[in-house]
Image (cartoon, rainbow, N blue to C red):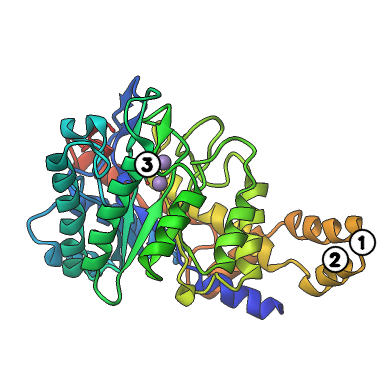
């Protein structure tokens, strides 16, 4: 790839930001309030628009329902457009209701299953109103104790709900199924891994795709293998990017393990899946408990850009030659050369070419936006109401 191609690919890259990154968040021990946090979905979108204004690659905001419920979603979409962004993925939430103590779509009680399915279908209505393509499903469903419920029956109930939701999708809409190893259930999770998500998606049809949340794996899992495998099968629909040190930490992507992020982006570039029309959506799923939120989102976008730039710089001819020759050290060296390149000057140039400040963090800090929202907004909303 020529340097011009690399710069063009970086300019064309798109990263979706989550509405919930801008609200107050914490752990189950403490939610820390920060000054200036949004009081409503409009203000979350306004903050997300700041991230796009300084990075130029984050024009899409993901919503979580009901956290971002409004009376008129069409109006919210227009509000976003006025600020230069648009509404992206609609994230369903069937995990914050007392009724879901024993599960949502897998609950043994048919009344609760109907209620959960009703919410999933309502999310598709919202997608119709916002013009969103993707419905993201993550289920907190699982059990805490062996024998608590029937593993196979729960899979049957899950399949039934997924099928009914899939049938409701419009021709241009997709269902993204997210997996997570554990939490909040500790003994068994109904969609614990990519294999389970993939098997359900295969049965549903081509518009059912797997989501890889980078924080949802056991320590040491080779996530880039999962990326390569799903891309090869045409079933990688999206990423939820974040970092983990221990569990589902939701820290800034590229903070815990920038090398892992590079390896993931290498597989993306290898499959030509960086393009906006590749069908792979790159989203952040993060919470910023102690750091300021808008700068944390800007930093996260920059971390993804740096990993992407390095992946684009891999000398693919030299890599293929070394691999074909069985040159283990040579092949590894090609990859490490790209990883060890300082791409910050290249990205600064890409930003300048796009008419942006080469240093988005400094430009945002200088803008006075943080001080303005701190003065204007009183009583900021908690992201996910303390989820
Ligand atoms: C679950 O841990 C998850 O990763 C899902 O994507 C949820 O929708 C999101 O977090 C909420 O923060
Ligand atoms: Mn997620
Ligand atoms: Mn998560």
Q: Tag 2, which secondary structure?
A: helix
Q: Nearer the viewer, residue 229 or 131?
A: 229
* Circle nearer the N terminus (3, 1): 3
Q: In the rendered image, which quarter contains the C terminus?
A: top left
Q: Nearer the viewer, residue 35 or 272?
A: 272
**Residue linked to disc 1:** 327
Q: How crowded is the residue under tag 3: few (<14 C-alpha within 10 Å), some, or many (20+)?
A: few
Q: Is mark 2 within 8 Å of ligand 2?
A: no
Total count of labels: 3
Q: Nearer the viewer, residue 362 or 128?
A: 128
Residue at x 28% of width, y 60% of height? 163
Select label 3 or label 1 by which is in front: 3
Select label 3 or label 2 by which is in front: 3
**Residue linked to disc 3:** 152
* Circle nearer the N terminus (3, 2): 3
Ligand 1, seen in the image, is in the quarter at top left
Say whether marks 2 and 1 touch (CB < 8 Å).
yes
Q: Residue furthest top?
A: 29
- What whole-number distance in Å separates the C-alpha atoms at marks 2 and 1? 6 Å
Q: Quadrant of residue 307?
A: bottom right
Q: Is residue 275 above or below residue 45?
A: below
Q: Tag 1, which secondary structure?
A: loop
- What whole-number distance in Å separates the C-alpha atoms at marks 3 and 1? 47 Å
Q: Can you give x and y, in whole percent of width and height, for residue 215 in the image?
A: 50, 41
Q: How crowded is the residue under tag 1: few (<14 C-alpha within 10 Å), some, or many (20+)?
A: some
**Residue linked to disc 2:** 323
Q: Can you give x and y, in whole percent of width and height, for residue 13 in the image?
A: 50, 69
Q: Can you give x and y, in whole percent of width and height, for residue 193 in the image?
A: 49, 45
Q: Residue furthest left?
A: 71
């Amino acid at each position: 790839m020529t340097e011009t191609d690399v710069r063009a690919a970086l300019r064309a890259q798109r990263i979706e930001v989550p509405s919930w990154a801008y609200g107050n968040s914490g752990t189950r021990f403490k939610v820390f309030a920060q000054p200036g946090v949004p009081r409503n979905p409009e203000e979350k979108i306004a903050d997300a628009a700041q991230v796009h204004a300084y990075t130029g690659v984050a024009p899409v905001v993901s919503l979580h329902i009901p956290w971002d419920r409004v009376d008129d979603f069409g109006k919210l979409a227009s509000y976003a457009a006025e600020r230069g962004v648009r509404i992206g993925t609609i994230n369903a939430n069937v995990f914050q209701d007392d009724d879901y103590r024993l599960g949502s779509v897998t609950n043994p009680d048919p009344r609760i299953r109907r209620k959960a399915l009703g919410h999933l279908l309502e999310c598709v209505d919202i997608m119709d109103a916002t013009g969103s393509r993707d419905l993201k499903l993550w289920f907190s469903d699982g059990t805490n104790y062996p024998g608590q419920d029937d593993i196979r029956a729960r899979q049957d109930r899950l399949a039934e709900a997924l099928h009914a939701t899939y049938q409701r999708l419009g021709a241009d809409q997709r269902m993204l199924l997210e997996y997570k190893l554990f939490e909040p259930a500790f003994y068994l999770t109904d969609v614990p891994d990519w294999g389970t998500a993939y098997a359900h998606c295969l049965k549903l049809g081509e518009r059912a795709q797997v989501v890889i949340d980078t924080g949802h794996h056991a320590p040491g899992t080779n996530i880039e293998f999962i990326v390569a495998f799903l891309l090869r099968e045409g079933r990688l629909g999206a990423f939820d990017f974040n970092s983990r040190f221990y569990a589902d930490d939701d820290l800034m992507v590229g903070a815990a393990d920038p090398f892992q992020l590079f390896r993931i982006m290498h597989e993306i570039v290898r499959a030509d899946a960086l393009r906006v029309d590749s069908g792979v959506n790159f989203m952040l799923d993060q919470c910023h408990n102690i750091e300021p939120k808008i700068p944390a989102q800007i930093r996260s976008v920059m971390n993804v850009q740096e990993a992407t730039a390095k992946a684009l710089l891999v000398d693919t001819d030299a890599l293929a030659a070394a691999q074909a020759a069985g040159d283990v050290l040579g092949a590894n060296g090609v990859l490490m050369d790209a990883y060890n390149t300082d791409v910050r000057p290249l990205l600064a140039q890409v930003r300048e070419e796009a008419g942006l400040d080469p240093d988005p963090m400094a430009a945002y800090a200088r803008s006075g936006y943080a001080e303005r929202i701190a003065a204007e907004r009183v009583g900021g909303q908690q992201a996910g109401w303390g989820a």
